[in-house]
Amino acid sequence: MKKIRIGNKLMGEEEQCFIIAEAGVNHNGDVELAKKLIDVAKEAGVDAVKFQTFKTESVVTKNTEKAEYQKETTGEGAQYEMIKKLELKDEDFRELADYAKEKEIMFLSSPFDKESVDLLYELGVPVFKVASGEITNFPLLRYIAKKGKSIILSTGMSTLGEVEEALNVIRSEGVRDVVLLHCVSNYPAKIEDVNLRAMETLEQTFKVPVGFSDHTLGITVPIVAVALGACVIEKHFTLDKNLPGPDHKASLEPNELEEMVRAIRDVENALGDGVKRPTKDEGAIKKVARRSIVAKMDIPEGTVITEDILDTKRPCTGIEPRYIDIIMGKKAKENIKKGEIISMRMITW
């Protein structure tokens, strides 16, 4: 499986999972709030913090209905008014990119129109992250691909055929470094809808690194995704779930984001390299947990060794029981007392 370099990080098999803290529009249109989100992401130990860059007029018609979850979190009305309030200016993104660089955390953002693609390219993002809703937006996919950067593509709401079509568009412009993110585009997504095994299907079908963009509540599912091989995890976060806005309630709060990062790193450490071997610490435990062959009774010198005069007991400082057949029929080289651990030197070979 090919590995993909994003900035100073490698994505792919056997590499540490790349964790994206999705700030999205949880800044509520306030650049200072966005900076606080960058601070939280840095403190949590993620690899990148990601926003969403768009010009409302280029994304949605003025009468487009809100999604049900958006109605539940922001009330009735059209998407246009809601999204317009969440739009940041170009200079805001320049300020945020500089701030992220100062804080030494990777700055990313998903573009939703060509003007935003140009801005992010100017800001030097190391990879373009494409949202699930844009997977059939071939004009935008082509425009992004023409920039020549790696692409992380979310696949929520998609069939396998639609993913293939999008990849073909991207690859037709010469981009080969693509990461696919399995995703369920519901906010929050139901556990029973997650279908994490689809990650394996994507990987086997398209031979690219695969990760998971998570919209479930809590941190259980992304942790399991890492255990199943996700090379990227993307997760929404907020300063406070009770803030007004469409995405806060389905996001992690700062302490939860930190907990998710710790758990993911623990899972990676626990997965290991797959080689079955005793650990260094097990070496000492083995001596007291395994058994040796011991004399079940006094064994005079010259006695032929038979199983009925032997027993097995801890510790493992003599001949291990797995070698019992080797000493059968041999003679005792010396007097062996009852309960004494038998070693090789006590046997005539």
Image (spheres, rainbow, N blue to C red):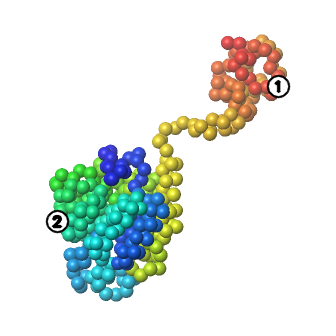
Quarter of the view holding residue 322: top right
User: Could you tell me if the residues under marks 2 and 1 are in contact, i.e. CB atoms within 8 Å?
Assistant: no
Q: Which residue is drawn at 21% across and 61% down?
A: 144
x%, y% of residue 334?
78, 14
The quarter in which the N terminus is drawn is top left
Quarter of the view holding residue 100: bottom left
Label 2 or label 1, whichever comes before in sequence order? 2
x%, y% of residue 57?
21, 79
**Relative horizontal placement of residue 267, taking residue 19 as reference (left or right):** right
| Residue type, label 2 | Pro
Instruction: Give me the disc on residue 139.
Output: 2
**Looking at this view, is 198 or 21 the one in front?**
21
Report which residue position mark 1 lands on.
338
Q: What element carries label 1?
A: loop
Using the image, determine if residue 304 lies above or below residue 48.
above
| Residue type, label 1 | Lys
Using the image, determine if residue 253 lies above or below residue 10.
below
Instruction: Give me the disc on residue 290.
Output: none
**Label 2 CA crowd tier, 10 Å (few <14, some 14–19, many 20+):** few
Q: How many labels does the image show?
A: 2
x%, y% of residue 202?
32, 54
x%, y% of residue 168?
19, 55
